[in-house]
């Protein structure tokens, strides 16, 4: 994962750099939006961590320039402002996620990975969720490198969850994806499939939470 | 400073002009002798002013002003109110808005800030005292009409009055009589039947009355008659008790005058208490101010509560000056008076 | 104001003056034209035919009528058929056209004649005898002295009346304005010497109209002072809490640094990290509380869907607590639940209640089901949102205290003591209520009742919050 960090606070930047390198990610650091724009011009990154409060051009300005140039680079906004409106406007301007300072470095890395994962899923066949790997072409699921043998319905359900991480899926959402119109199914069938899938996933980083009254949510805990 | 000097110069030059603007020309249809006391007093009050007094009869005066043969006068005085009104109406007079009315009770004594009356001259009866030694003198118009009917022989050819066709005053009085008194037609018929003697002028009638040629004069100008009666013991004057027309002698300043100030002063003097007092005490005229007792009114007839009927100075006097109206009136008058001996 | 009114009145006066001038002119013309008209009729009556002659015997009455304008000069001319002058002035400024146009109806005109303004009437009469046939025309003129003076009289009278009315109106207005403004002057006199910070009310006034205003000012001032007071308390509380936490961290750091060993004991760093995490949470919540209070003052309310909002909040919570054994349950309807409110404030409140439930819902028992149930019920005029946990709950006597800032109740000491305070403030901001109870799950039940303000926000009453 190749990360560009745009942050004007040296100490914080140094810590983030340190943490990301320790975890085996390539990270470059600039302290202004202008420099970030220059680097982005001739280099490719997997994700951009962007502070809002920067000397000179603000993070928002850089973000809106990127989006108006049709640059789809995943962007994670860091903000320290109390006003929650900042978060709203960041998402409106095309940010993919945001974090409010102070944050845990672990959380920051996880959010970055999630963004990269989502972006890769669109192009690569191989999707990595912590220690779980899923190949969307061959439909092969591996946990810690070992192939897990699953039924097609379970694989379909896993694929649905992996492509909708951290989002609430209702039973209807799942049924519509797993069954055709003419296929009869019982609500229990979904529950049973889910139970089996959970069993397969024990020991993996993928958690599937049930929220009664709402649905199901998959989360990668890495 | 220079402004004050200039002002002083202007004021001085005005005084100089007044001092040398000496001649006040008066064209007047009034006997010089009757008005002389007034002229003298005015001359005394304004010693630097010379008065040039020119006498006309009323019609001549009118003609002279309408078609001037002589220099323009400053002041015009006449006893013919109708002609005066006509002259003023036709624009011969100067408007004097700084001259107050005589009194609120006499609104008829001036017209339109231009024509100003200054005397009050009733139309009266005059009789020969000796002729009436045995008879009652008629003191009203009705009484006269009765006597003319009852004693035709006494009055026949011996009653005189103005010739309305030839005397301006006679015409005025005849027409006003017609307007004022409903029995005028009957009285005039009686006069015609009595072969009244008609003349142009007051003096001729007074002379004939004094000599006994006439016994009764009808509708004579009171001022001259009273002045004459004062000196002439043969005649006496009666102010008719039922009603008496009053002729207002009037004056105006000619609009082309060179001396508007002096001319205005003269008219103001005529109407002033001093002027009125002089009229009452010394002249042959009768004053407009009724509170004064004229010396010629020996029997105080003018201060009695008689029904005086002043002829208003106003545009209605133009009516009988209308050519056609005059012809029409005189035609009828002459019809009635055809037996009269002019 | 008075000056502007005066100017306006002058303008009105000017306009009215033109109208009055016109009226005066018309009425003077009207009355004196009638004199001319009747005099001319009367004069025409004197014209007759006898034989082959036209007889003219002008009646005295015609001149008596004209004499009603006593100072005015009179001019006339009488013309026979073919325009021959029969009598009167021969130089009248009247053309043949005028005479012709008068055959239908009398014709009036204002001319200059002998250096004077003269109003003329031209009137005709048809003679239809065998001997004489044709029109006899009379041209009668009168100068305009009386006419002008009546016009001036009317004008001056009307103008004087107008001006008097205007002056009175201005005076009345001046008095009225002074009287109307007097209470305000009294009020500003009362306010002048006071400091805005002083906590004394304005004296009662006997002026009836001002009483609501003084009341409002007093009310406003008290609210302001209350807000100021709560802000002061807040700052004091916050500094105390933050400084205490900072002191702890600092002390721990110093101990770690002063240790003789060259390497730092990982356990003590872990302790420092834990304390710092608490400090962070404290700071975040203080700021969140400040935001809630501040937004509560602003009352920027919009239409929101409570159902959708709750789902969003729960989804975030599920994600954030996915790695724990906390289970969530949501009992809500399928349809939207709309109300007017501040979404940010409500979200902050709910998230804090949920965080609170997560922290306090934990138990030491091994087979304990750690469930958080969120439910919403729609009442007649309100919504009730309940967040229940399966922890120990709060004993009844301590519940009121639990809503206060920095109150820590119960055995678990991990909380900052701000979560419920924030929710409480949010509830008050929306004129709602936060109540604590016992859940059927065994733990605490937090009920947030929000009035259903689906109308506009304008009828909102300012309300204290602390």
Image (cartoon, coloured by chain):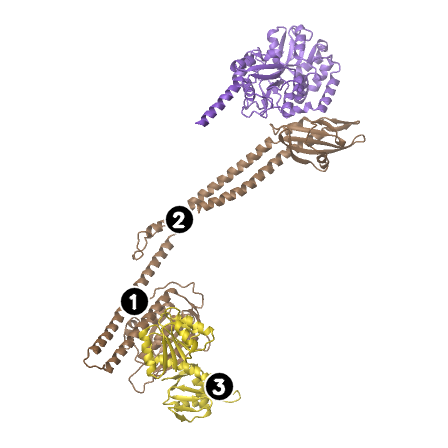
Chain colours: A yellow, B purple, C brown
From the viewer's perspective, tell me whether residue C461 is left or right of residue B161: left
Cβ–Cβ below 8 Å for labels 3 and 2? no
Name the mark on residue C181.
Answer: 2
Find the residue positioned furthest to the front: A42
Can the viewer see residue C55 in this picture?
yes
The mark nearer the N terminus, 1 or 2, is 2
Q: Dot 2: what SS?
A: helix
Label 3, secondary structure: give it: helix
- Give the quarter of the image for residue C456: bottom left
**Most foreground residue, C363 or A60:** A60
Q: Is residue B104 left or right of residue B131?
A: left
- Which label lies toward us, 3 or 2? 3
Mark 3 chain: A
Labels 3 and 2 in the same subunit: no
Residue A177's mark?
Answer: 3
* Mark 3 → mark 2, Cα distance in angstroms: 75 Å
C446 vs A164, nearest the viewer: A164
Q: Is residue C438 visible?
A: no
Give the total of numbered labels.
3
Subunit bearing disc 1: C
């Amino acid at each position: 994962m190749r990360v560009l960090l745009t942050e004007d606070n040296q100490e914080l930047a140094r810590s983030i750099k340190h943490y990301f390198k320790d975890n085996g990610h390539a990270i470059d650091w600039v302290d202004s939006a202008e420099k970030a724009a220059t680097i982005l011009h001739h280099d490719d990154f997997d994700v951009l961590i962007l502070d809002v409060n920067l000397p000179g051009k603000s993070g928002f300005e850089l973000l809106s320039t990127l989006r108006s140039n049709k640059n789809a680079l995943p962007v994670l906004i860091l903000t320290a402002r109390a006003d929650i409106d900042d978060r709203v406007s960041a998402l409106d301007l095309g940010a993919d996620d945001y974090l409010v300072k102070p944050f845990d470095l672990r959380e920051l890395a996880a959010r970055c990975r999630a963004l990269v994962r989502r972006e890769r899923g669109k192009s690569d066949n191989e999707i990595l969720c912590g220690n779980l790997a899923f190949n969307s072409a061959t439909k092969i699921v591996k946990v810690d490198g070992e192939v897990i043998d699953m039924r097609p319905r379970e694989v379909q359900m896993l694929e649905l969850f992996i492509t909708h991480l951290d989002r609430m899926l209702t039973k209807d959402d799942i049924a519509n994806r797993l069954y055709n119109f003419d296929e009869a199914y019982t609500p229990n069938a979904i529950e049973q499939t889910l139970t089996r899938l959970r069993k397969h996933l024990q020991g993996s980083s993928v958690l599937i939470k049930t929220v009664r009254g709402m649905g199901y949510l998959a989360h990668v805990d890495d | 400073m220079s402004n004050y000097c200039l002002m002083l110069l202007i004021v001085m030059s005005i005084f100089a002009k007044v001092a040398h603007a000496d001649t006040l020309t008066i064209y007047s249809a009034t006997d010089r002798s009757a008005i002389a006391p007034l002229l003298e007093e005015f001359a005394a009050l304004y010693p630097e002013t010379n008065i040039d007094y020119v006498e006309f009869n009323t019609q001549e005066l009118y003609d002279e002003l309408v078609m001037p043969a002589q220099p323009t006068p400053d002041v015009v005085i006449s006893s013919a109110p109708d002609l005066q009104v006509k002259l003023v109406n036709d624009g011969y007079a100067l408007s004097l808005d700084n001259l107050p009315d005589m009194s609120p009770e006499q609104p008829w004594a001036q017209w339109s800030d231009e024509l100003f009356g200054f005397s009050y001259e009733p139309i009266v009866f005059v009789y020969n005292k000796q002729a009436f030694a045995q008879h009652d003198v008629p003191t009203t118009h009705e009484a006269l009409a009765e006597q003319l009917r009852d004693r035709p022989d006494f009055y026949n050819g011996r009653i005189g009055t103005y010739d309305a066709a030839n005397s301006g005053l006679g015409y005025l009085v005849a027409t006003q009589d017609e307007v004022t008194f409903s029995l005028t037609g009957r009285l005039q018929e009686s006069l015609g039947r009595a072969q009244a003697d008609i003349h142009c002028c007051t003096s001729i009638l007074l002379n004939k009355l004094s000599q006994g040629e006439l016994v009764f004069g009808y509708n004579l100008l009171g001022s001259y008659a009273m002045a004459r009666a004062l000196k002439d013991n043969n005649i006496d004057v009666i102010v008719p008790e039922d009603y008496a027309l009053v002729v207002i002698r009037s004056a105006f300043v000619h609009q082309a005058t060179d001396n508007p100030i002096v001319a205005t002063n003269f008219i103001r003097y005529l109407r002033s208490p001093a002027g009125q007092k002089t009229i009452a005490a010394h002249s042959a005229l009768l004053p407009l101010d009724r509170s004064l007792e004229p010396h010629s009114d020996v029997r105080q007839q003018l201060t009695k509560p008689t029904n005086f009927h002043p002829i208003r100075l106003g545009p209605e006097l133009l009516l009988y000056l209308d050519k056609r109206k005059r012809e029409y009136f005189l035609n009828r008058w002459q019809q009635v008076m055809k037996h009269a001996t002019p | 104001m008075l000056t502007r009114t005066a100017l306006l009145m002058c303008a009105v006066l000017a306009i009215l003056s033109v109208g009055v001038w016109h009226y005066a002119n018309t009425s003077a013309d009207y009355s004196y034209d009638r004199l001319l008209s009747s005099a001319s009729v009367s004069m025409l009556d004197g014209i007759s035919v006898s034989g082959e002659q036209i007889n003219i015997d002008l009646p005295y009455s015609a001149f008596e009528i004209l004499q009603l304008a006593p100072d005015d000069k009179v001019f006339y001319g009488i013309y026979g058929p073919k325009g021959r002058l029969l009598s009167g002035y021969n130089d009248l400024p009247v053309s043949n056209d005028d005479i012709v146009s008068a055959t239908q109806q009398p014709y009036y005109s204002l001319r200059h004649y002998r250096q004077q303004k003269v109003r003329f009437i031209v009137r005709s009469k048809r003679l239809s005898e065998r001997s004489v046939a044709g029109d006899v025309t009379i041209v009668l003129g009168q100068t305009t002295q009386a006419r002008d003076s009546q016009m001036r009289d009317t004008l001056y009278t009307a103008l004087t009346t107008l001006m008097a009315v205007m002056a009175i109106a201005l005076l009345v207005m001046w008095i009225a304005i002074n009287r109307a403004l007097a209470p305000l002057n009294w009020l500003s006199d009362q306010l002048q010497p006071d400091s805005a910070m002083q906590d004394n009310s304005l004296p009662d006034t006997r002026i009836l109209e001002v009483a609501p205003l003084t009341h409002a000012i007093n009310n406003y001032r008290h609210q302001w002072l209350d807000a100021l007071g709560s802000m002061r308390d807040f700052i004091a509380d916050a500094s105390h809490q933050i400084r205490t936490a900072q002191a702890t961290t600092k002390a721990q750091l110093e101990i770690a640094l002063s240790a003789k060993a060259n390497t730092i004991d990982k356990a003590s760093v872990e302790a420092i990290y834990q304390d710092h995490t608490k400090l962070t949470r404290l700071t975040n919540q203080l700021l969140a509380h400040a935001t809630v209070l501040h937004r509560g003052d602003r009352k920027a309310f919009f239409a929101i869907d409570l159902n959708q909002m709750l789902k969003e909040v729960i989804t975030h919570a599920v994600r954030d607590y996915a790695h724990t054994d906390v289970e969530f349950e949501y009992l809500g309807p399928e349809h939207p639940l709309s109300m007017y409110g501040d979404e940010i404030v409500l979200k902050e409140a709910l998230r804090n209640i949920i965080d609170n439930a997560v922290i306090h819902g934990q138990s030491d028992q091994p087979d304990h089901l750690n469930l958080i149930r969120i439910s919403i019920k729609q009442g007649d005029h309100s919504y009730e949102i309940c967040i229940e946990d399966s922890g120990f709950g709060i004993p009844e006597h301590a519940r009121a205290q639990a809503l206060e800032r920095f109150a820590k109740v119960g055995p678990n000491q991990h909380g900052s003591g701000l979560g419920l305070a924030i929710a409480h403030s949010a509830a008050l901001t929306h004129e709602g209520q936060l109540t604590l109870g016992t859940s059927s799950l065994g733990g605490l039940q937090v009920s947030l009742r929000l009035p259903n303000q689906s109308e506009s926000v304008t009828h909102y009453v300012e309300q204290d919050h602390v």
